[in-house]
Image: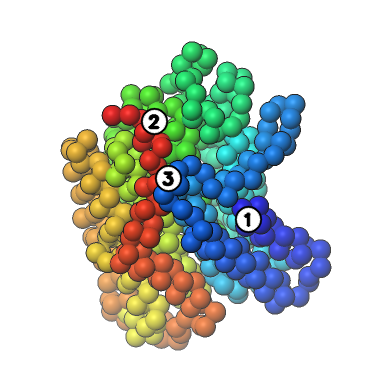
Amino acid sequence: MLSIIIFLPVAGALVIALFLRDATRIRVTALLSTLAALIISLLLFPQFDPAKPGLQFVERFSWIPQLNVQYFLGVDGLSLPLVILTTLLGFCAVPVSWHISARPKEYFIWLLLLETSVLGVFSALDFLLFFVFWEIELVPMYMLISMWGSAPPVGRREYSATKFLIYTILGSALMLVGILVLYFSAGTFDMIELAKMDLKPVVFSLPVVFFLLFAGFAIKLPVWPFHTWLPDAHTDAPTAVSVMLAGVLLKMGGYGMIRVNASILPDVLKEFAWLLVILAVINVLYGAAVTIVQSDLKRLIAYSSVSHMGLVLLGIAALTPVGFTGASMQMFTHGTITGLLFALVGLVYDRAHTRQIPQLGGLAPKMPLITVVFLIAGLASLGLPSTSGFVAELLVFLGAFPVWQVGAALAAFGVVLAAAYILWMIQRVFFGPENTRLEHLTDALPIDTVPLFALVAAIMIVGVYPSILTNLFSAGVAPIVARLGS
C-alpha cells in the first residue's frame, strides 16, 4: 500500500504528460490522483496498531544486490502521520492551483512529482533510496519556483529558485558523505540495522558523521544561520508551492534529525544537545523578532516558520519522550496551520494583487469567510488552546523544561512574540481602516473552500482530541528514546 500511495501522484503526472491537453481535464486528473493517495493513506490509519512495536506495512526486496541496496519501505508512529500530512497537503495544493493558466500541464506534472518525492522520503528506510527521493524533490521545486513564481519587478523567481537549489544541494552533498561513511564502515544502507549497531568500533569519527548528516537536515528545517533561502523561496513561489514547502518540505529536516541523528547516532546527540538548544532558542527568538517587522504577508509567515521550527529543534534536544513527541507534533501541526496560512495569503493576493500589509486594510466586510478562516489559522499559529498549535507547543515545553530550564524559558518568550505579530497582522489587514481602492474584492469561491475546510478540520480535530496523534508519535519515538538511554 505504501508503494501505491507514493506513486499514485506520479502516475497521475504520467497520464497528464502522455494523454491530456485540456486544462480542465489536467486539473481533474491531478485532483483525483492526489485524492486517491489521501484516501489510501487515511485507510492505513485505523489499520496501524500503536501497541505493536516497530515497522508496519513493510515492503522489502533487493534492489541493487551488488551494493546491498534494498527497496525498503515501512512506516511507524513517527512517519505515518507525516505521510498522511503530505497526502493531505498534496490534495489541497491542487484546488489552490486551480486558477493557474500558464502552462498548466507542466505545472501539475511538477507538482505531482513533488508530492511523490516527499512521500518517498517519509517512507524509505534504505539510506540510498531515502537519498534518491530526497534529491528528486529538488527538481520540481526549482522548476515550480523559477517558472511559475513571482516575476520581476514584483519578485525574483530565478534568484530565489537558484538560492534554494544551491543551499539544498550543499546540504545534500554533506549528507551523502555521511551516508557513504556509514555504508563503508558498517556495510549496509539499512537504516533500521544501523540503528541497532554499535558504530563506535567501525566509524572513524562519529561526531564528524553526525554533523555531516545534521548539516543536510539543518538546512532543510531550516536552522539559523542556514535559513536565508526560505523567505526568498516562499516570497517568490506560487501559492501551492509555498503550501507544500512550509507544510512538508521543512519537515523532512526534522524527520531526518529524529530518524537518523537521534536513532543511529544517539550518543553524539546527547553530547551535543546543548548546541541544539542554543540553535533552537536563536531560531525561535530571531525568527519571531524578524517576523514582527515584515510588511509582506508571505515573508511574515515565512519568518514565522523559522521561529516555529526552532521548537522542533528544542523538542529533539530535550532527549525525553515528551520532547520527541512534542517535536513530532509540532511538525504535523505546523504543516496544517502554515499551509492554511499560505493558502489564505494566496487568496488575498489573487484578489488584491498585493501582499503589502500597508496597502491592505478593512478586508473583513468584503471577505468574511477568508477572514474567519484566517483568524482560526492565526490563533492556532500563536498556540490558542483547543487548536493543534497549543498541543504541540505545550508538549515541547513540557519535555524541554525539566532538562533545559533557561533554554525553554527563553523559547517560551517566542510565544509572546508570536501573539504580537499574528494579532497585529490580522488587525491591520482585515480590521484596519478600509482601503477604498479595494472595494471590488470578493470572497472565496467554492473550489477555494476545499483546502480551507480540510485544513481547518485537521487543526480543530487534533486540537480537541490530540491523542489521535500523540499515541502514534509516542509509539514511534519510544525505540529512539530507548536508544538514548537515561
User: x and y percent of residue 13 in the render?
Assistant: 71, 61
Q: For this view, does 302 lie left or right of residue 56? A: left
What amino acid type should be assigned to the residue bearing mark 3?
Answer: Gly
First along the sequence among labels 2 and 3:
3
Comparing 462 with 291, the one in front is 462
Mark 1 neighbour density, 10 Å: few (under 14) some (14–19) many (20 or more) = some
Residue visible at 63% across and 55% down in the picture: 1
Query: Badge 1 is on which residue?
Result: 1
**Do the numbered discs 1 and 2 sit on residues whose CB atoms are within 8 Å?**
no
**Do the numbered discs 1 and 3 sit on residues whose CB atoms are within 8 Å?**
no
Q: Secondary structure at mark 3?
A: helix
Identify the image quadrant of the C terminus: top left
Q: Is residue 261 above or below residue 134?
A: above
Question: What numbered label is drawn on residue 476?
Answer: 3
Q: Secondary structure at mark 2?
A: helix
Colour logic: rainbow
What's the distance in space between the residues labelled 1 and 3, CA to CA? 19 Å
Residue visible at 52% across and 54% down in the picture: 83
What's the distance in space between the residues labelled 2 and 3, CA to CA? 13 Å
User: x and y percent of residue 381 in the render?
Assistant: 32, 61
Residue 70 occupies quadrant: top right
Query: Badge 2 is on which residue?
Result: 483
Q: Secondary structure at mark 1?
A: loop
What amino acid type should be assigned to the residue bearing mark 1?
Answer: Met
- Whether residue 361 is visible here, answered yes or no, is no
What amino acid type should be assigned to the residue bearing mark 2?
Answer: Arg
Residue visible at 40% across and 71% down in the picture: 456
